[in-house]
């Protein structure tokens, strides 16, 4: 690959990706954030913008991590980290919590992923059908149930393999569910004609982005 | 006079048979009936099918295994039904060694299967898991243009529950995020056994605050278990 551009751009890191996605979440949305990079998004939505965060273990209105020595051991999020509850927050049991998810009540969920296909197929729970420790968690419910599914992930694997594909090669989480992808290099919508690039990081051209992507990219 | 309080762990665990399906509530260490799990380990029933959110934390060589991991380590669990298994956990080891069957279920489907059991719904269709590995062998129907799979209710012979406060009728309240699987497992267990941090007089819990009414509860044991442990 002719990679003279390699020094001219800097891919977004975990916080950079989370910050970028946080910009696009409007006031009033009910949002679930998946484990990993998506969890960081909550810290980058301004507190004066009222976004209601849901956690699978039965919390609506989840707030940020507590200050040191003020932790409540009875209040954890789906990643089992100690969190807080914002005024107006509430608790529900697990079936109601997933009723919120499966009943289509969430405006958005943001998930990590291994792969996303150009038709919106998502693979984020296993790298093979014979995983040593199969970990579905709530991903299949969230992918199917939320009004919008955004994915936040590195644009390619550490070995340089593309993650935005014509077809997922890992076991699917759900079909045709992803609506937008925030990668370390671009913001990309999933549309009926495939991947449409909305935004590219400074210093990287469309063609250079395409060279790092297996699926065909379209200009907005 | 109705009094669902039992005076000893032995009394709480009485009659749990080999081969039972046991629902274990909790998420992380929060809302997890750890004392009752110790009681089940002591009681001795084996060949169990366990239903729980997860298969337990990664093995920590500096700490003795406890709870569900200990039950698995002792070879007492024939099958584990849960939403995920960590590769480095006791459950992951038992699964790979072929010592224990594992059925991995999407967490929302798991919760709904339990809720359905408690509500007398034998099965339901859901789009969660359609066109994935977990759909294999399941009936598929299309509703409103979406592919859906048939999931069966998941009742328990026994449910182990942790409450913050209970009265002698078995009315329960939960603290903060410890609610999680507790109310639905209490409904889905034929024999629902509760450990409670606090004991209330009858009528002391405001009727509107009762989260699990006593009709779903069979036995209550007072255990001042202390705060949940920090994860990891």
Image: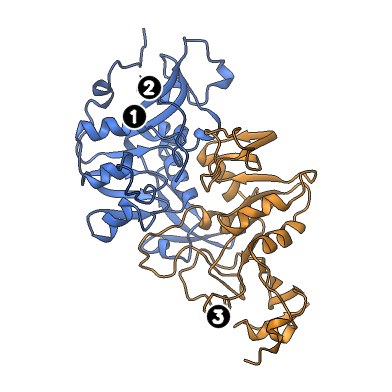
Image position of B214 (left or right of A39): left
Which SS class for mark 2? loop
Task: Name the quadrant containing residue A88.
Answer: top right
Q: Is residue A214 left or right of residue B53?
A: right
Residue pointed to by mark 1: B35
> Callout 2 environment at 10 Å: few (<14), some (14 to 19), or many (20+)?
many
Separation of residues labelled 1 and 2 (CA atoms): 7 Å
Chain painted in orange in the figure = A
Callout 2 and callout 3 share a chain: no
**Dot 1, how many residues are within 10 Å of its Cα: few (below 14), some (14-19), or many (20+)?**
many
SS state under label 1:
helix
Q: Which chain is blue?
A: B
Report if the CB atoms under discs 1 and 2 are less than 8 Å apart.
Answer: yes
- The residue carrying mark 2 is B223
Q: Is residue B181 above or below residue A212?
A: above
Q: Position of residue A79 (x, y in %)?
A: 52, 48
Residue A95, x across and y down, in percent:
51, 41
Q: Quadrant of residue A7?
A: bottom right
Callout 3 crowding tier (Cα within 10 Å): few <14, some 14–19, many ≥20: few
Name the residue at 54% across, 75% down: A157
Query: Measured along the vertical axis of the image, is residue A141 above or below residue B131?
Result: above
Q: Which residue is mark 3?
A: A160
Q: Earlier in the sequence, mark 1 or mark 2?
A: 1
Q: At 46% from the left edge and 33% from the top edge, which residue is drawn?
A: B228
Nearer to us: label 2 or label 3: 3
């Amino acid at each position: 690959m002719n990679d003279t551009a390699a020094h001219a751009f800097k891919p977004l890191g975990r916080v950079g990706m989370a910050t970028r996605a946080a910009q696009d979440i409007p006031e009033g949305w009910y949002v679930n954030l998946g484990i990993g990079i998506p969890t960081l998004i909550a810290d980058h939505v301004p507190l004066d913008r009222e976004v209601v965060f849901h956690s699978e273990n039965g919390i609506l209105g989840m707030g940020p991590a507590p200050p040191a020595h003020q932790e409540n051991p009875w209040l954890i999020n789906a990643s089992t980290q100690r969190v807080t509850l914002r005024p107006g927050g509430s608790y529900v049991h697990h079936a109601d919590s997933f009723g919120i998810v499966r009943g289509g009540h969430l405006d958005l969920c943001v998930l990590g992923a291994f792969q996303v296909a150009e038709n919106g197929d998502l693979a984020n729970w296993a790298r093979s059908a014979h995983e040593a420790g199969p970990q579905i968690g709530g991903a299949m419910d969230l992918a199917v149930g939320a009004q919008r599914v955004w994915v936040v992930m590195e644009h390619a694997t550490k070995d340089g393999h593309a993650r935005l594909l014509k077809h997922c090669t890992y076991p699917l989480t759900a079909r045709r569910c992803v609506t937008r992808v925030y990668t370390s290099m671009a913001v990309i919508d999933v549309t009926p004609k495939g991947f449409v690039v909305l935004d590219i990081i400074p210093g990287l051209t469309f063609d250079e982005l395409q060279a790092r992507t297996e699926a065909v990219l379209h200009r907005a | 006079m109705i009094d669902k309080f039992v005076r000893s762990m032995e009394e709480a665990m009485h009659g749990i048979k080999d081969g039972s399906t046991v629902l274990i509530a909790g998420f992380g260490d929060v809302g997890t009936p750890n004392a009752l799990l110790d009681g089940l380990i002591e009681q001795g029933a084996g060949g169990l099918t366990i239903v729980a959110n997860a298969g337990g934390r990664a093995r920590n060589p500096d700490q003795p295994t406890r709870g569900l991991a200990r039950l698995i380590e002792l070879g007492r669990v024939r099958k584990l039904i849960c939403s995920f298994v960590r590769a480095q956990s006791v459950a992951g080891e038992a699964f790979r060694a072929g010592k224990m069957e594992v059925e991995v279920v999407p967490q929302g489907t798991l919760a709904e299967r339990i809720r359905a059991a408690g509500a007398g719904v034998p099965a339901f269709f859901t789009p969660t898991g359609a066109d994935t590995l977990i759909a294999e062998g399941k009936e598929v129907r299309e509703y409103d243009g979406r592919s859906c799979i048939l999931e069966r209710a998941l009742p328990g012979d026994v449910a182990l529950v942790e409450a913050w406060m209970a009265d002698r009728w078995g009315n329960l309240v939960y603290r903060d995020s410890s609610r999680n699987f507790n109310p639905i497992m209490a409904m889905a267990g034929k024999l629902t056994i509760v450990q409670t941090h606090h004991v209330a007089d009858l009528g002391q819990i405001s009727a509107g605050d009762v989260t699990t009414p006593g009709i779903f509860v069979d036995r209550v044991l007072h255990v001042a278990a202390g705060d949940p442990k920090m994860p990891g």
